[in-house]
Image: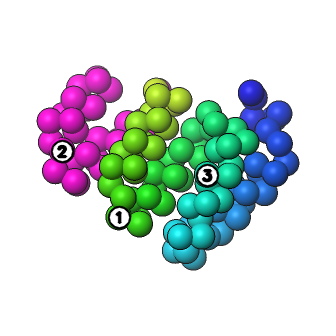
Amino acid sequence: MDAAEYPEEFDRLMDDVAEAMEEKRYEAALPLLHEALALVEDDPEAWQRLGATQFALGDDDAAIDAYRRWWSLAPRNPLAFRATANLLFRVGRLEESEAAALAWL
């Protein structure tokens, strides 16, 4: 699905997510992100925000999974690679972080 074809509800939800994240209301953002991804399951930005939200809530494994999904949807996006490798490094998963860095190269 092309971004121009996304449902209006998805755009509204993502606007609400952005507002909640800006205000550091991550608990409020999480269900909105799940709802948005139910509408458009392959949106890279939604996966990025989901990972950031889960990390902020302390769910490192879920954040890593979301960032990996983001990276798989946007493999040429250096931010997706960097966020994934950085998060793996920050949580002490050094071999996986190194593997992510090598995969990017």
- Report the Cα–Cα distance between label 3 and label 2: 26 Å
The magenta stretch is 76-105
User: For the residue marked with disc 1, what is the amino acid?
Assistant: Gly
Identify the image quadrant of the C terminus: top left
| Label number found at residue 27 | none
Residue at figure coordinates x 29%, y 41% from the top left = 85
Asked if the stretch drawn in magenta spans residue 81, the answer is: yes
- Report the Cα–Cα distance between label 1 and label 2: 15 Å
Confirm whether residue 83 shows in the render.
no
Asked if the stretch drawn in magenta spans residue 92, the answer is: yes
User: For the residue marked with disc 2, what is the amino acid?
Assistant: Arg
Residue at figure coordinates x 76%, y 49% from the top left = 10
User: For the residue marked with disc 3, what is the amino acid?
Assistant: His
Reading the image, the residue beneath label 2 is 93
Looking at the rendering, which quadrant does residue 25 occupy?
bottom right
> Nearest the camera: 101 or 12?
12
Residue 71 relative to residue 6: left or right: left
Label 2 Cα neighbours within 10 Å, binned few <14 / some 14-19 / many ≥20: few
Reading the image, the residue beneath label 3 is 34
Residue at figure coordinates x 47%, y 35% from the top left = 69
Magenta part mainly helix, strand or loop?
Answer: helix
Reading the image, the residue beneath label 1 is 58
